[in-house]
Amino acid sequence: MCTSHAHDQGEAAQAGAGRRGFLRATALLGAAATAGLTLPATAEAAAAEASAARWRPDPDSRRFTLAVMPDTQYLFDGPSIDRAPVEASLRYLLDQGGHENLVFLSHLGDLTQNGTKSEIAAISEAFALLDRRGVGYSVLAGNHDVKSSTTDQRGATPYLDAFGPRRFRGKPTFGGASPDGYNSFHLFRAAGREWMVLALDWRLSDQGYAWAADVLARHPRTPVVLTTHELVARDDSLSAYGQQLWDRLIADHDQIFLTLNGHYWPAGRATRRNAAGHDVHLHLTNYQNRYFGGAAMIRLYRFDLDRNVIDVETVSPWILGRAAEGLNELERQESELSGDADRFTVGIDFAARFAGFDPVPPRPPRPAARVLVPDTVAYWRFDGHGDGTAVGGTVRDLSGRGNDLTVVTVGGGALSWSSDHHPDQPGHGSLEFQGYKSPLKGAYLRTVDKAPLNSATFSNGYTIEAFYRLPADWDPAHHAWSGLVGRTGTGGAAGKTADDPDEPLATLSLSDDREPQWAMRPLNQQGIATNWGQETPLETWRHLAVVNDGRHTTLYVEGCRVVRNPKAAAVGIASVGLPWLLGGYEYGGRIDQILHGRLGDVRIVERALPVTSFLNHRPTPRGSS
């Protein structure tokens, strides 16, 4: 589906998109460049050494930045050559590279106005700042850098002499170039994986298309940002050549998820769905029509794979660096751009988007023996059964402690097996509960009468874990306050009459707002102690862990501690020797509500476990941040 960026929720403009201290140190560096000053050789060498030491992108951080510089042609136009704005932007990137985790810079073509030797030489000298620091970057020819009527088979040009493959050989990010030298690809590591920038000439020949397709075929699992000079012409519209590029290359190569181009103005965005049915984000960025020929504006694409977003910001370090001198009216307007096409957020579920060409292998099931940590007193899992078949007989406690479960039906309800499971769950299966409040109907599980768990009080601490998933039709009017795991017996029966004496002694339940709540009566209190989690999203698996260290209880959601954990001491769990329930909740000694949703592995350990021992824990790969 093709949608306008003004209505695309995945690319909603966010004026407050994460800035990460954007302006830090810009003024000093920008001011020096703006004034047309050349640093003394010794100072330049010292700055080079310092910057080289700082430019070390973190290849494992899930936050990184790709910088983009569009058309700079009016800064390099015959006798009107001014390197200062470009150098200010490059110096900013060098200075802030570590803070931004800058991984790469892409220029989008039209480096110069006429493509003459003197113009090319001037911008080539500016880019030498990056060469001396070993920074990875790409350039490509625009229609003003070469004869516009030619393709990438045009032969020698001043542009190729300065920015051809020889310039990039030996750089760690340089992957290679087409035989003609006008197309190149560049590889960098970020977020623990390889990424590619495919930099294509102003006009691809048949040979150029074949070369690009071959590069993609040789890197079949690498996500690609395609850069070229012309593609998007305005919002939601491709140029005639851009449409050709889409038809002949982009549409059939799912790896290409983002394209960046200049040439036209004003800035704009489009979204197209490729042959694989996935969205490709196509961005036009060009500011040559604005003050000072765009003032070497740079656009920062801040990738955040934990938030599944790219935060985009557009700024001129050269103008910002002049702040100490006092800015004129136009400079004050142009220092940072905040329009919908200049500052926005692109929402991308990276794992899902890349799954077609680089699927993440599912975590395999883990044998019960591997998760039976010392002091495990109960472990139930529900794999190895056909989807939709009814649960009958006994569900064994795999800990070997004899805490087996039996099925209890209410109102003719049923309980069935499912292969659905949390991606990090040891057992690849779950139980499908179909509880309903009024009239009460469903089925749940209870421990057998002589189960040792029934009388356990956990005075030295405990860890209770459960995986669960709520369906799309979960309705608080019919499904609220159903229990995931809990013990029966009322507070009144245990001689604890503070608060509501008809409440059960312990229950891990879901509120009418789908918040998990651990409510229980400790041995050292008359009243009920509660821990609260945040709202559970529908149709999403969640892992809960309730951990008591013998004094205090902490609730974790997906391994993350929640905010509402009581600070009062809570020792053990009161008991009157009655069964535990899975999927059921009792009030006043009677079943009152049955879970509507799926329940995966459940484990109870009679001590506090660290997060690294939870059932859903994924070991961090060596070298990851």
Image: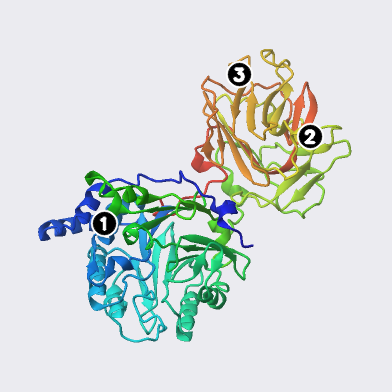
Q: Nearer the viewer, mark 3 or mark 1?
A: 1
Q: Quadrant of the N terminus?
A: bottom right
Q: Quadrant of residue 474?
A: top right
Q: Quadrant of residue 409?
A: top right
Question: Pointer 3: what residue?
Answer: 523
Q: CA distance from mark 3 to mark 2?
A: 33 Å
* Rendered view: 280 above or below 588: below
* Badge 1 amino acid: Ala
* Badge 2 amino acid: His
The residue drawn where x is 62% and y is 71% is 275
The residue drawn where x is 26% and y is 66% is 127
* Badge 3 amino acid: Leu
Q: Does the residue at mark 3 contact the one at mark 1 (Cβ under 8 Å)?
A: no
Q: Secondary structure at mark 3?
A: loop
Q: CA distance from mark 3 to mark 1?
A: 67 Å
Q: Residue 493: x and y, percent?
A: 73, 16
Question: Pointer 2: what residue?
Answer: 478
Mark linked to residue 417: none
Q: Residue 179: x and y, percent?
A: 38, 84
Q: Residues within 10 Å of mark 1 (few under 14, many from 20)?
A: many
Q: Does the residue at mark 2 contact the one at mark 1 (Cβ under 8 Å)?
A: no
| Left or right, residue 407 beside residue 209 | right
* Rendered view: 537 above or below 492: below
Question: Pointer 1: what residue?
Answer: 88
Asked whether residue 262 is in view, the answer is: yes
Q: Nearer the viewer, mark 2 or mark 1?
A: 1
